[in-house]
Image (cartoon, rainbow, N blue to C red):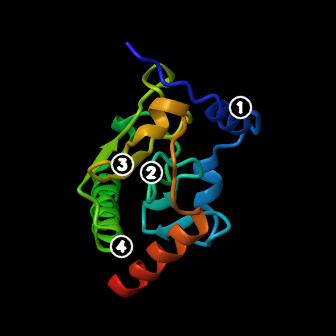
Amino acid sequence: MYILWAPWRFKYIESVNSQNKCIFCEKSKEEPSVENLVLYKSRYAFIILNLFPYNTGHVMVAPYKHTSKISDLNNDEWIDITGLLDLSIRILESVYKPHGFNIGMNLGKIAGAGIEEHIHIHVVPRWSGDTNFMPIISNTKVIPEGLEDTYNKLKKKLSEKL
């Protein structure tokens, strides 16, 4: 089995855990802006760009409720979250025309959750050929667009759709 080392991710995990504040709870209190990467807020959840994306357009949907358990969410919260998942996919399809998506949750540290105390759903656009020789030869993943540009494109499309 090949292990992909991404030691830069640990700095992020340490910084989040050392703050003793939940990044999702903190960001949910702020109004959407390019500085905080919050794209959209609904009644029970919000969409935020991933600060350390796996691909261009990598967003997350998180509930306002601070919980690590899916069972703690009520039906209204789940309906809102799935509505934001749908909105995220539609906006990403419109802006980036991906060939597919990875959508998922890492529940618990052992499952890979960097922020295990607050559930969130990753939405990662994928394209045929989006993994090239760079990860293989130099253990480097290329993200071809800056977060500010990604934010501005998605925010503009959100404004048009709503």
Instruction: Decide: few, some or many residues near mark 4? Use Cα within 10 Å; few <14, some 14-19, many ≥20.
Output: some
The spot of residue 129 in percent (x, y) is 31, 48
Q: Nearer the viewer, mark 3 or mark 4?
A: 3
Q: CA distance from mark 4 to mark 1?
A: 33 Å
Residue identified by numbered label 2: 55
Does dot 3 land on a helix, a strand or a loop? loop
Q: Residue 95: which numbered mark, if any?
A: 4
Q: CA distance from mark 3 to mark 2?
A: 8 Å
- Of pointers 3 and 1, the one earlier in the residue sequence: 1
Identify the residue at horizontal 64%, vertical 66% (top origin): 30
Q: CA distance from mark 2 to mark 1?
A: 22 Å
- Of pointers 2 and 1, the one earlier in the residue sequence: 1
Residue identified by numbered label 1: 14
- Of pointers 3 and 2, the one earlier in the residue sequence: 2
Q: Nearer the viewer, mark 2 or mark 1?
A: 2
- Of pointers 3 and 4, the one earlier in the residue sequence: 4
Q: Nearer the viewer, residue 66 or 159?
A: 159
Does residue 116 appear anywhere in the picture? no
Identify the residue at horizontal 39%, vertical 46% (top origin): 121
Q: Nearer the viewer, mark 3 or mark 1?
A: 3
Q: Nearer the viewer, residue 21 or 137?
A: 137
Is residue 16 left or right of 119 when viewed as pictured? Answer: right
Q: Nearer the viewer, residue 134 or 77?
A: 134
In this picture, is 75 found above or below 104? below
Q: CA distance from mark 3 to mark 4?
A: 16 Å
Residue identified by numbered label 3: 130
Question: What amino acid is found at the position of numbered circle 3 in the picture?
Answer: Asp
Does dot 4 land on a helix, a strand or a loop? helix
Question: What amino acid is found at the position of numbered circle 4 in the picture?
Answer: Val
For this orientation, the residue located farthest to the bottom is 160
Is residue 125 left or right of 116 when viewed as pictured? Answer: left
Q: CA distance from mark 4 to mark 2?
A: 14 Å
